[in-house]
């Protein structure tokens, strides 16, 4: 099993640009989660999917953020009109129906200049 | 809503000494509790978890934690610290049996002195 993968690992963008991140969960994991982690803080929950359905969204997920999981496999997180406050590590995690723990990917570090 | 408090943003211990990282939580329902470790520029790795049953749980790398409902605590311990234990440690809680998003504490940076 290859684990959760995320692409890209690093992204530098200018304020106002759009960015998209990809997460590939562990195969056969039907739940997929997105978190944001800023420096010196713990991860904060953004949203999660069960198969292709987006079941919960945090208040942190502003209108500029959108997440999809069209076929219930990989997921994308898009940030439109990026702001400097969006600079953070974006973590993806997945789990199966038979497990309570989440398995995390290595994260995508976003820097908005 | 659930919350997690980790006392001490930095903890320093000598190699071979006891490691104690504190975690207190609030939850309106019986919680599921987790400890994760994060090495620089990496994702989070599960150390151990408590769901139901035995309140003393053992994890990887010699770590263990005890769920104390009366104290709403889930402190992480290791009898003898190793240099490789230096990392960031996060306590997390789930109200939804692990199905919902986790609520994390702010983390404790563990420093190991030679």
Image (cartoon, coloured by chain):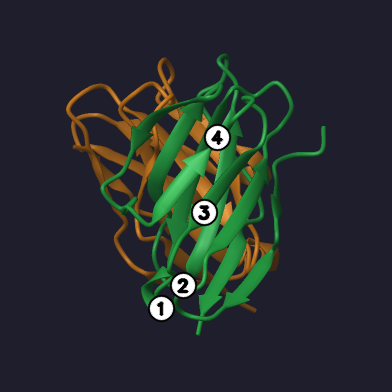
Supply the letter of whichever chain is orange.
B
Q: Are marks 1 and 2 in contact (CB under 8 Å)?
A: yes
Q: Secondary structure at mark 3?
A: strand
Q: CA distance from mark 1 to mark 2?
A: 6 Å
Observer able to see residue A54: yes
Q: Quadrant of the N terminus of chain A?
A: top right
> Tag 3, which chain?
A
Q: CA distance from mark 2 to mark 4?
A: 24 Å
Q: Earlier in the sequence, mark 1 or mark 3?
A: 3
Residue A6 lies, with reference to residue B2, above or below; the image says below
Which disc is residue A84 wearing? 1
Q: Colour of chain A?
A: green
Residue toward you, A76 or B81: A76
Is the residue at mark 3 from the same chain as the one at mark 4?
yes
Q: CA distance from mark 3 to mark 4?
A: 22 Å
Q: Earlier in the sequence, mark 2 or mark 4?
A: 2
Residue B39 lies, with reference to residue B98, above or below; the image says below
Q: Where is mark 4, residue-wise?
A: A102
Q: Where is mark 3, residue-wise?
A: A78
Is the residue at mark 1 from the same chain as the one at mark 2?
yes
In the image: residue B25, left or right of residue B100: left
In the image: residue B95, left or right of residue A9: left
Q: Earlier in the sequence, mark 4 or mark 1?
A: 1
Which disc is residue A87 wearing? 2
Q: Residue at x 39, y 74 (%)?
A: A83
**Percent of width and height locating residue B89:** 49, 57
Residue A60 lies, with reference to residue A19, above or below; the image says above
């Amino acid at each position: 099993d290859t684990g959760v993968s995320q692409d890209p690992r690093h992204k530098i963008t200018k304020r106002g640009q759009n960015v998209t991140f990809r997460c590939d969960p562990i195969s056969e994991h039907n739940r997929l989660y997105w978190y944001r982690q800023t420096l010196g803080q713990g991860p904060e929950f953004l949203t999660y999917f069960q198969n292709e359905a987006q079941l919960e969204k945090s208040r942190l997920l502003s209108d500029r953020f959108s997440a999809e999981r069209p076929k219930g496999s990989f997921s994308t997180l898009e940030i439109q009109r990026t702001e400097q406050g969006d600079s953070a590590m974006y973590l993806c995690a997945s789990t199966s129906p038979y497990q309570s723990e989440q398995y995390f990917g290595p994260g995508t570090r976003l820097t908005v200049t | 809503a659930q919350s997690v408090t980790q006392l001490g943003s930095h903890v320093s211990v000598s190699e071979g000494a006891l490691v104690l990282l504190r975690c207190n939580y609030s939850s309106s329902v019986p919680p599921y509790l987790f400890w994760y470790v994060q090495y620089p520029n990496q994702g989070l790795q599960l150390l151990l978890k408590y769901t139901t049953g035995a309140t003393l749980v053992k994890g990887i790398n010699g770590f263990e934690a005890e769920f104390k409902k009366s104290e709403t605590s889930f402190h992480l311990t290791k009898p003898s610290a190793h240099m490789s234990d230096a990392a960031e440690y996060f306590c997390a809680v789930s109200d939804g049996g692990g199905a919902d998003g986790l609520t994390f504490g702010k983390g404790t940076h563990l420093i190991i002195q030679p």
